[in-house]
Amino acid sequence: MTDGRRNEPITVVGAGLAGTLLSIILARRGHRVRLYERQDDMRRVVLDAGRSINLALAARGIRALELAGVMKLVEPELVPLPGRMLHDLSGGLTFVPYGQRPEEVIYSVSRPGLNCILLDAAERAGVELLFRHSAVSADFARNQITFQGPSGQPHDIAMERVFATDGAGSILRRTMVEQLDIACTEDLLKHGYKELTLPPFPDGQPRIDKHALHIWPRGGFMLIALPNIDGSFTVTLFLPLNGPESFETLTTPASIETFFATHFPDVRQLMPDLAAEFFQHPTGIMGTVRCEQWSFEDRLLLIGDAAHAITPFHGQGMNCCFEDCSELDALLTNSNDWARSFREFETSRRPNTNAIADMAIENYLEMRDTVRDPKFHLHKALSLELERRHPTRFVPRYSMVMFRDDIPYSVAFERGRIQSEILFALTQTADTLAAVDYAAAAQMIEARLPPLPG
C-alpha cells in the first residue's frame, strides 16, 4: 500500500483515535509521518477519569482498522453487544436485538485502551510521536503553524501536507475559519453528560448482563452502561444542563442520592461510589460541528471531529472518523494530486457526515424516550420481518448504519426516512405482526426502495 509520493513528509496534529489511525495508514503508504499531540503520552501517565464515553465499534470502524493492519490487536479489547437492554422504573428488563444475524453485533471498547494500541502501532510503523506539543495558531498567508512545546517556547513549521485531527475544538479549524472567512457552526446541546462506574463483584463477575448496551430511558434524560473487559461498566448519565431536573440541581450528595433513587433505583444500589464519582468527574458537553470548507489548497485538511464533530448517540463518532481515514486512503491511491484528493474528500464525505450528525440527534430522542412506546417495539419487530421477506430492499436503518459499510450514511438516512413512512402506514390499523398487510407492504417496498448493492 504505497504510492508515487513515498517519503514525502506528513504532519498530523492530534494523537487521538483519528490522528493515530491516519498516521498508521499514511506511514504504511511510505510517508514520513510526524504526529503532534498537546497532551502527555497516555501510555505513560494516569489519565483523568470521567472524560471518555465508552465507544461502540461497528463495521465502518472495523474496516478502517483492518486497512491499517491493527484489527487483530484490538480484538482482545472488545466486548460483543448483540442488543440493548432496557430498564424500566420498576426494574423490569426488555432486550431489543440490534439485528437478526449472528454477525450483527457492535463492540464495546475503551477509548484510552484503543488509543494506546494505535499509538503503539504508529510507533512500530515509523511514525514520530511528539507529545506536549500544542498547536496554538496558524498563519494561512505565510503557510505556517505555530506549536508550543514542553519548554514553552513557540516554534513554527511549514503548513505543507498537514492533517488536522485535533478534535471538535480544533485550533486549526477555528483559525482557518477566522482567517479565510469560512462559515462554520458549533451547535452545543443543552444536555451534558457525566461518566460514572458500575464496578464488578469482588470475584470480577459483572453485576448486570455483560453482553448488552444497557439503557435507562426516562423521557427527557437517560442513563446508559457499556461493559468493559474487566467486568465493570462505564455508566454515562445524559441530562439537561439546566432546569428542574438537571446537572445544575445535583449539587449535594443528598440531591444525587435522591435523583438516582427516584429514577434509577435498580442501578443505584450497584454503585457504591456514586456521589464521590459524581463530584470528581467533570460534566462533559456535546455538540455538532458543521464547517463549509475542510481543506486549504494542497496544504491542510481537516479530518474527523475537527471537520464534523457529532453527538455520541448513534455510536458512530469514532466509526465515522475511522471511515474518513479509509475513504481518504482510497482517494490517495487513485490520484497523485493532493489538492484534488482533498476536494474530492470534502465533496464525497460532507453529505454523509451531515446525515450521521442528524441521525445521531434522532437516536438520542429514540434512546431516552421513544423506546418506551409499544409502537416503537412493533416497528422494530416489523422492520426485522420485512427484512426477512425483502432482504435486498428493506434493511433497517440502524443495520445500514452499523453493519453495512458499503452503504453511505446519506443513503441510509434517506432510505430510513422512506422505511419509517412504510412502517407507520402498515401499523395504522395493525397492532401486531399478524395483523400487518404484507401484500401492501410488498407493493410499497418494491415501488419505493430499489435493491441495495450486494
Image (spheres, helix red, strand yellow):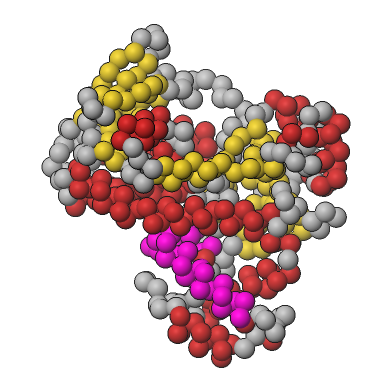
Q: Position of residue 327 (x, y in %)?
A: 32, 51
Question: For residue 174, what is the image quadrant?
Answer: top left
Residue nearest the viewer, comparing 243 with 227: 243
Say whether residue 424 is magenta: yes
Residue nearest the viewer, comparing 139 with 55: 139
Q: Is residue 400 left or right of residue 213?
A: left
Question: Is residue 130 in sight in this rendering?
Answer: no
Residue nearest the viewer, comparing 21 with 414: 414
Question: For residue 157, what is the image quadrant?
Answer: top left
Identity of the residue drawn at 59% across and 62% down: 98
View extreme (front): residue: 181
View extreme (left): residue: 4
Q: Position of residue 85 (x, y in %)?
A: 70, 56
381 relative to 353, above or below = below
Say whether residue 408 is magenta: yes
Identity of the residue drawn at 22% across and 39% down: 297
Q: Position of residue 125 (x, y in %)?
A: 30, 33
Q: Position of residue 271 (x, y in %)?
A: 78, 37
Identity of the residue drawn at 64% across and 56% down: 365
Q: Main secondary structure of the magenta part?
A: helix
189 relative to 377, above or below = above
The quarter of the rendered structure image containing the C terminus is bottom left
- Number of labels in the image equals 0
Question: For residue 295, what is the image quadrant?
Answer: top left
443 relative to 329, above or below = below
Residues in magenta?
Answer: 398-425
Question: Is residue 276 in sight in this rendering?
Answer: yes
Identity of the residue drawn at 40% across and 25% down: 37
Q: Is residue 12 left or right of residue 248?
A: left
Q: Is residue 243 left or right of residue 367?
A: right
